[in-house]
Image (spheres, grey):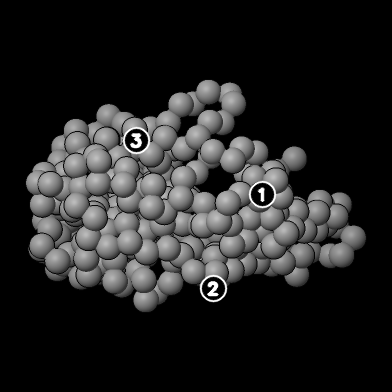
């Protein structure tokens, strides 16, 4: 039986380890060439997309995702900030996109272009970067955020993930891949431990909210405590400081 947990957006501003300071810097980069169109692939509720459109008062934004609850929350945020006429949130087949855009966001969504086999393989950065480059004209800008190994993976780090050392590459390898797929690398960053702690805390906060709202002896309470402990253990005793998230600022050349 599914446990009805509070939505993630109750405790997270972004659906990735991303601070306000870094987000505003990425928005400045994406709007530096006055884009008319901005596309966010795997947008969640689109907080970064909304900030980009706020930075570019004539731009039109489109966020694509399969999570209907997240899309609905994005529409609510857009309406509350007076952006409903300029930002749309839709569910669509991202792999079928062909129309170019001026600015593009893709954070933690490279698996869209990967092999959908039963056994998870290494993340297919090549397929993702090839597809993303095809959506940009020369001079178009991309914020590409994706998982990397910040340090060599350990068994404890890989166990709660795909269970393999080759799931991700390191930061230098990723920048070289981007440069080899038709991009000039304008800037490289990586989520800090503080950003990761805030992000991971947002997920476990949902379990805490559930426990506060239900009696101690609720039939699902032990299961919720188990899920919360599993998440904390996977992070704190597993991939904390090892799994990273790179933020590349790229220009199509």
- Give the CA distance from mark 3 to mark 2: 29 Å
**Residue in the image at 69% along x and 62% along y:** 236
Q: Does residue 21 appear in this view?
A: yes
Residue 194 is labelled as 2
Given this view, does label 3 or label 1 mark the residue nearer the observer?
1
Q: Position of residue 196 (x, y in %)?
A: 54, 65
Q: How crowded is mark 3: few (under 14 residues within 10 Å), some or many (20 or more)?
A: some
Residue 121 is labelled as none
Q: Where is residue 231 in the image (x, y as percent from the top left)?
A: 70, 55
Q: Where is residue 152 in the image (x, y as percent from the top left)?
A: 58, 51
Residue indicated by mark 3: 126
Q: Is residue 29 left or right of residue 2?
A: left
Q: Position of residue 2 (x, y in %)?
A: 70, 43
Which image quadrant for residue 92? top left
**Residue in the image at 29% along x and 71% along y:** 25
**Residue in the image at 14% along x and 66% along y:** 32
Given this view, does label 2 or label 1 mark the residue nearer the observer?
1
Relative vertical location of residue 251 with respect to residue 27 in this rendering, above or below:
above
Which image quadrant for residue 5? bottom right
Q: In this view, does 210 lie to the left or right of 162?
A: right
Residue indicated by mark 1: 154
Q: In this view, does 28 lie to the left or right of 5?
A: left
Callout 3: helix, strand or loop?
helix
Dot 2 or dot 1: first in sequence order is: 1
Dot 3 or dot 2: first in sequence order is: 3
In the image, farthest residue toward the bottom:
21
Given this view, does label 3 or label 2 mark the residue nearer the observer?
3
Q: Does residue 38 appear in this view?
A: no
Q: How crowded is mark 2: few (under 14 residues within 10 Å), some or many (20 or more)?
A: few
**Residue in the image at 16% along x and 48% along y:** 252
Q: How crowded is mark 1: few (under 14 residues within 10 Å), some or many (20 or more)?
A: some
């Amino acid at each position: 039986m599914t446990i009805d947990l509070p939505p993630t957006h109750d405790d997270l501003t972004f659906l990735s380890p991303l601070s306000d300071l870094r987000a505003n810097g990425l928005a400045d980069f994406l709007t530096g060439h006055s884009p008319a169109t901005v596309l966010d692939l795997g947008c969640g509720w689109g907080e970064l997309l909304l900030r980009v459109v706020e930075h570019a008062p004539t731009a039109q934004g489109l966020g694509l995702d399969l999570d209907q609850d997240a899309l609905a929350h994005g529409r609510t945020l857009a309406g509350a900030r007076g952006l409903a006429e300029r930002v749309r949130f839709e569910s669509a087949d991202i792999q079928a996109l062909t129309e170019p855009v001026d600015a593009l966001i893709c954070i933690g969504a490279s698996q869209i272009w990967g092999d959908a086999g039963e056994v998870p393989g290494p993340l297919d950065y090549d397929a993702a970067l090839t597809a993303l480059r095809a959506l940009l004209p020369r001079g178009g800008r991309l914020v590409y955020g994706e998982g990397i190994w910040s340090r060599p993976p350990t068994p404890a780090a890989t166990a709660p993930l795909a269970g393999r050392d080759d799931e991700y590459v390191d930061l230098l390898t990723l920048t070289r891949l981007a440069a080899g797929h038709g991009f000039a690398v304008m800037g490289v960053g990586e989520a800090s431990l503080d950003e990761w702690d805030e992000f991971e805390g947002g997920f476990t906060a949902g379990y805490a909210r559930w426990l506060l709202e239900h009696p101690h002896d609720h039939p699902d309470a032990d299961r919720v405590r188990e899920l919360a402990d599993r998440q904390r253990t996977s992070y704190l005793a597993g991939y904390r400081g090892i799994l990273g998230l790179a933020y590349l600022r790229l220009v199509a050349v």
